[in-house]
């Protein structure tokens, strides 16, 4: 329920207001099509690729940091990437309504966030301890991307309505495409120049590319002043189907990021080179692109999203239990990276369908799904670090990675159990 105050100048005011609104509507660029929509989607795709795509390559940095004398004894290296991604998801319930309230400032926020991200990498290049890297490459980068990202998502919802699932799939694909190519470059830079020069170079590139694309990032609707925070209808919390979605999402979030963090290290322990480890991570990210576009397309056409949830999570679980657990060669690791990336990487595309199924205003539900994924990510990082051992052998998961492989498989299997909410969907 919301209350709107209208200024009434006289008996003609309602008619004049309607005519003004109709005139503004006629001059708005069309949603779902036209140059404005596709230019915005292209710009947001590039930003996603440049800034989020960098986070997807953290496995290369983790493998590098774990081999450096000043860092290798720390068990908190996985927290650097986990903290950055978790902040982005955990902040969703707070940042989303603020982005709606302060519409007039959304482009300013985008510029501020675009500046903080490269500055955080510049700060990380001077770090000489894991806590300092967590504070800069982790916390500061995550905050910068959060400030930028949610205004962009709000604008995306203005430009795409009927084809929103496809639009989100293409947006997310930007990060995956960068994640499929950047690991090779990072591996070369880290091996030749070290992390300090590499981080500074990435900061410069991010600054130049994002600054060039920002003119395309404009909303479709006229911005208003500081509007009152809208009263959120929380009635969806009473629906059992929401909790089915939420638990499936949380379980998926617990396991999702672990392979991208540990696959390069797994490859190194198999005796494969750093470039090969980067290749495996790139394959995982490329498969994520294809999965997000493919499942985004299906999401607009399949009425019951729980069927897609089951396919995504069950195949991911089977791939972890079998292919990764028994992997002993490059071929088997690539097969796992492709299967897991395609299926598990598509899950955020389902959030839009979760929201539209439960409420006329899907944004609060999307925010809570992002929050759940953030909780899973931040909790999983220390768990994964604790499950790894120093013993390397020929057993399941090389012995060293047995615990985290089982953890990923169980998490994905638990997520697939959301299919039992099918009856709730039909009620």
Image: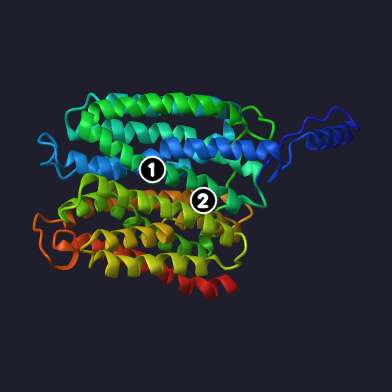
> What residue appears at the point 48 percent right and 28 percent down from the top-left corner?
210
Residue, disc 2: 366
Given residues 335 and 224, the one toward you in this image is 335
Q: Which mark is residue 29?
A: none
Quadrant in the rendering for residue 227:
top right
Q: How is the image coloured?
A: rainbow
Do labels 2 and 1 touch, CB within 8 Å?
Answer: no
> What residue appears at the point 27 percent right and 43 percent down from the top-left corner?
60
Q: Position of residue 403 (x, y in %)?
A: 19, 62
Give the side of residue 396 with respect to residue 189, left or right: left
Given residues 1 and 104, the one toward you in this image is 104
Against 128, residue 251 (above or below) is below
Given residues 41 and 249, the one toward you in this image is 41
Outermost residue to the right: 12
Quadrant in the rendering for residue 33:
top right
Q: Is residue 240 visible?
A: no
Against 317, residue 279 (above or below) is above
Residue, disc 1: 181
Q: Position of residue 314 (x, y in %)?
A: 39, 69
Secondary structure found at label 2: helix
Q: Is residue 405 visible?
A: yes
| Mark 2 / mark 1, whichever is N-terminal | 1
| Distance between mark 2 and mark 1 Cα atoms | 29 Å
Against 163, residue 204 (above or below) is above
Secondary structure found at label 1: helix
Q: Position of residue 5 (x, y in %)?
A: 72, 34
């Amino acid at each position: 329920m919301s209350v709107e105050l209208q200024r009434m100048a006289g008996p003609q005011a309602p008619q004049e207001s309607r005519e003004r609104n109709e005139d503004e509507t006629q001059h708005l660029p069309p949603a779902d099509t036209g140059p404005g929509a596709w230019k915005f989607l292209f710009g947001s795709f590039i930003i996603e690729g440049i800034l989020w795509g960098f986070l997807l390559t953290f496995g290369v940095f983790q493998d590098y940091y774990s081999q450096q004398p000043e860092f290798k004894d720390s068990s908190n290296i996985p927290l650097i990437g986990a903290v950055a991604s978790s902040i982005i998801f955990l902040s969703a319930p707070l940042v989303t309504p603020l982005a709606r309230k302060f519409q007039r400032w959304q482009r300013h926020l985008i510029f501020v966030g675009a500046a903080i991200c490269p500055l955080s990498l510049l700060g990380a290049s001077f770090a000489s301890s894991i806590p300092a890297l967590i504070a800069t490459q982790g916390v500061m980068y995550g905050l910068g991307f959060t400030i930028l990202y949610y205004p962009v998502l709000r604008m995306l919802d203005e430009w795409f309505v009927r084809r929103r699932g496809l639009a989100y799939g293409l947006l997310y694909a930007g990060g995956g495409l960068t994640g499929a190519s950047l690991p090779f470059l990072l591996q070369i830079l880290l091996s030749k120049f070290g992390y300090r020069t590499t981080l500074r170079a990435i900061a410069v590139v991010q600054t130049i590319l994002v600054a060039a694309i920002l003119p395309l990032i404009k909303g479709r609707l006229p911005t208003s002043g500081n509007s009152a925070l809208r009263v959120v209808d929380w009635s969806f919390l009473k629906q059992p189907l929401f909790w089915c979605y939420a638990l499936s999402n949380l379980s998926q979030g617990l396991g999702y990021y672990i392979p991208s963090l540990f696959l390069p290290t797994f490859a190194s322990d198999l005796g494969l080179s750093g470039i090969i480890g980067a290749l495996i991570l790139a394959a995982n990210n490329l498969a994520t692109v294809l999965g997000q576009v493919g499942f985004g397309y299906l999401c607009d056409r399949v009425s019951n999203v729980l069927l897609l949830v089951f396919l995504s999570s069950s195949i991911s679980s089977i791939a972890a239990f079998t292919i990764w657990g028994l992997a002993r060669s490059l071929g088997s690791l690539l097969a796992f990276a492709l299967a897991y990336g395609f299926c598990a990487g598509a899950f955020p595309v389902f959030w839009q369908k979760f929201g539209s199924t439960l409420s006329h205003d899907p944004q609060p539900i999307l925010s809570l799904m992002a929050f759940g994924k953030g909780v899973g990510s931040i909790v999983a990082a220390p768990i994964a670090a604790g499950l790894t051992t120093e013993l390397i052998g020929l057993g399941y998961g090389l012995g060293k990675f047995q615990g985290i492989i089982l953890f990923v498989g169980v998490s994905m299997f638990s997520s697939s159990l959301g299919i039992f909410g099918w009856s709730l969907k039909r009620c």
